[in-house]
Image (spheres, grey):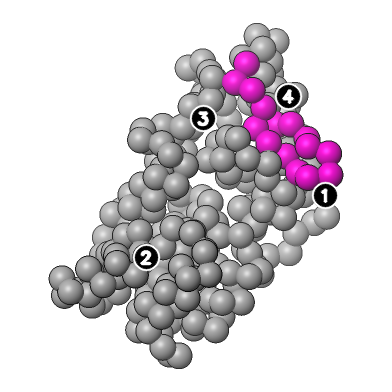
Amino acid sequence: MHVLLIEDDALVASGIQAGLAVYDFVVDPVTTMAEARSAMQTVSSDLVILDRGLPDGDGMLLLEEWRRAGVDTPVLILTARDAVSDRIEGLHVGADDYLVKPFDLDELVARLQALLRRAAGRSRALIEHGPLCLDPVSREVSVAGRPVSLSRRELVLLEAFLQAPRSVLTAGQLKDSLYGMNEEVESNALNVHLHHLRRKLGSRVIETVRGLGYRLGKPSAVEVMRRHGAGRA
């Protein structure tokens, strides 16, 4: 999952980035409202972590701006402003959650995962698609109870599809889920990861929608290929 981190404290930002990387979040850190506006137009983010005290203004103004424009990306406000009135204001403006500094990294991760569940319309932590099961916390994948070994990129790509099971995802959206803004991406990298997923989980587990992108196949596609041994790592 791709996170846009808007935080001007370099130490806090680097700690969050390192901590979220353990859970396979791709984090793009920016330090100002201006950089955040540019990043939001350039990259498809699944979540936003927003500080309020930014060098060029109050992050709340940026949130108001996005909500007025119809941007519905889940936003978690992360700030030192701990008054109840500040929390109420943030939620009324359009924040999906509000966490006060100092904070525990595990709690931040749990809140982000809860926001992802809510955005996808799920109530359970486990993501299931037929016999395929992904645990977002342990980062384990199984097919009909049998573990499947995936690389970090393959796991992130699979999670992107499972979070939006009925959507067609463009190549650009998938690349955004895999790579940060400043990472160099080889032209065939996405195709390589898709090939590996299909080899391990079934040739029809990811469908190509010609001219548009890719989408998750039917749940039965995973099961059929498992019977032929494609579920082995």
The span from disc 2 to disc 4 (Cα, nearest Å) is: 39 Å
Residue 214, percent from left and from top: 72, 39
Magenta stretch, residue numbers: 206-220
- Of callouts 3 and 4, which one flags the residue occurring earlier in the amino acid sequence? 3
Nearest the viewer among 181 and 207 is: 207
- Of callouts 1 and 2, which one flags the residue occurring earlier in the amino acid sequence? 2
**SS label for mark 2:** loop
Write down the residue under mark 1.
188
The span from disc 4 to disc 1 (Cα, nearest Å) is: 20 Å
- Of callouts 2 and 4, which one flags the residue occurring earlier in the amino acid sequence? 2
Circle 3/circle 2 CB separation < 8 Å: no
In front of the other: label 2 or label 4?
Answer: 2
Nearest the viewer among 206 and 183 is: 206
Question: Which mark identifies residue 94?
Answer: 2
**Dot 3 amino acid type:** Val
Is residue 211 found inside the magenta-colored segment of the image? yes
Residue 116, percent from left and from top: 43, 47
Circle 4/circle 1 CB separation < 8 Å: no
Task: Say whether residue 49 is left or right of residue 170.
Answer: left
